Amino acid sequence: MENLFIEGSDSLPQVEFNTSGKLKIEGRALPENAHDFFKPLITWVKEFAIDELNLEIILEYFNTSVSKQLYDFLKAIESNPKYKTINLKWSYEDGDDEILESGEIYEDLLPRINFQYNCFDEVFDE
């Protein structure tokens, strides 16, 4: 199994999946085809095996199609019996209730995943 890295852009988040069990998705998620973007991520987590998986998601924005694929991605993690412990750090910008509520909805739907919420100050682009 190899690490997975996808360079981010204005419309795609950066993806860093490390075989140490540390996974990170960060940025804006507005892909033209969310299914195609998430397909290699879902394949990777289905094939990967480790006792403790630590995932960090820091999305400043994602659209409805990404929301569905993100749920499918998290469900693929939760349904993988090779993971004994699944930790998810869900980060959201202070005041961004939509991103926070999305995390809370996923938490209700995915009880095996240990959610931790991280509120960060607004980031200003210069």
Image (spheres, rainbow, N blue to C red):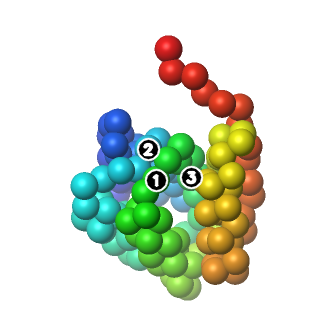
Query: Which of 96 and 36 lies nearest the eye of the viewer?
Result: 96
On-image quarter of the N terminus? bottom left
The amino acid sitting under disc 3 is Ile
Residue ID for mark 1: 62
Residue wearing tag 3: 57
Classed neighbour count for the residue bearing mark 1: other residues with Cα under 10 Å, few (<14), some (14–19), many (≥20): some
- The answer to whether residue 34 is left or right of residue 26 is left
* Residue 43 in sight in this render: yes
Work out which residue is located at the far top of the displayed protein and give it.
126
Circle 2: residue type:
Arg
- Label 1 close to label 2 by CB (< 8 Å): yes
Q: CA distance from mark 1 to mark 2?
A: 6 Å
Residue 99: mark in rendering: none
Q: Give the quadrant of residue 124.
A: top right
Sequence order check, earlier mark of 1 and 3:
3
Residue 82 visible? The answer is no
* Above or below for 45 versus 88: below
Q: Which amino acid lies under the numbered mark 1 shown in the image of this protein?
A: Phe
Q: Secondary structure at mark 2?
A: strand
Q: Position of residue 23 (x, y in %)?
A: 51, 54
Which residue is at a point 74% across and 58% down the rendered structure image? 116
- Residue receiving disc 2: 28
- For image coordinates 71% across by 42% down, the residue present is 95
Q: How would you rate the neighbour count of disc 3 (Cα within 10 Å): few for under 14, some for 14-19, many for 20 or more?
A: many
Residue 86's spot in the image, x, y percent? 64, 69
Residue 54 in which image quadrant: bottom right
Rendering coords of residue 102 (x, y %):
61, 63
Mark 3 and mark 2 in contact? Answer it, CB < 8 Å.
no
- Residue at horizontal 57 percent and vertical 78 percent from the top: 78
Tell me where residue 73 appears, x and y as whole percent.
Answer: 45, 70
7 relative to 105 in the view: left or right: left
Q: First in sequence: mark 3 or mark 2?
A: 2
